[in-house]
Image (cartoon, rainbow, N blue to C red):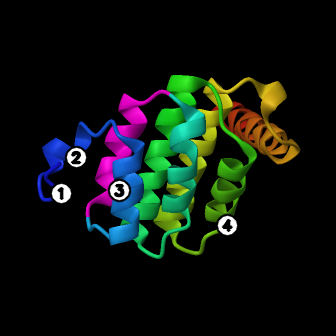
Amino acid sequence: MNWDDITDLMGCDDPDEVEAAFERGEQLVGVALLGLSLSVPDADRVGPLVVRALQSDRREVRLQGLTALGHIARLTGRVDQLLLNALRALMRNPDSEIKEHAGMVADDIWIFVPHSQLPWWMRARSVVHALGWWFVKRWWDITEK
């Protein structure tokens, strides 16, 4: 695999190759992880690599890991506790872009993963969001008259 060609990396379908890229510190490992998350619909095999990306020191790799997590949720309908813990940590990140992206991924997880498999904090987050939208709608209804 050519580690300088983004197009080649987006076609990555070998988890072992991505694992080795993490070990080598490849610059474009996040791109390969995105390709892997789209090519290998196995949450058990890809999930640990996504956790590794979410815990990376490199901001770009964390953002790409978040996108890969969204792909896993959409394609498999499954996420494990390690992925959810890493996501929750990023939802509290002081970097607004990471925090916002993590929130969007949490929304994807809420849509594509059965709610019975999700932790209490995701359920609470959904209730808070629903109440927020209800209040906004009521405010617009009141001020429109």
State how far apart marks 2 and 3 are (Cα): 9 Å
Identify the mark nearer the N-term, 4 or 2.
2
Mark 4 or 2: the one toward you: 2
Say the numbered circle drawn on residue 9.
2
For badge 4, the amino acid type reads Arg
Outermost residue, right side = 120
Identify the mark nearer the N-term, 4 or 1.
1
State how far apart marks 1 and 2 are (Cα): 7 Å
- Please give the range of residues in magenta: 28-41
Say the numbered circle drawn on residue 3.
1
Q: Secondary structure at mark 4?
A: loop
9 w.r.t. 138: above or below: below
- At label 4, counting other C-alpha atoms closer than 10 Å, the crowd grade (few under 14, some 14-19, many 20 or more) is some
> For mark 4, what is the residue?
92
State how far apart marks 4 and 1 are (Cα): 32 Å
> For mark 3, what is the residue?
30
Residue 12 lies, in percent from the top left, at: 28, 40
Residue at (83, 42) in percent of width and height? 119
Q: Secondary structure at mark 1?
A: loop
State how far apart marks 4 and 3 are (Cα): 21 Å
Q: Is there a contact, CB below 8 Å, between mark 4 and mark 3?
A: no
For badge 1, the amino acid type reads Trp
Identify the mark nearer the N-term, 2 or 3.
2
Residue at (37, 65) in percent of width and height? 60
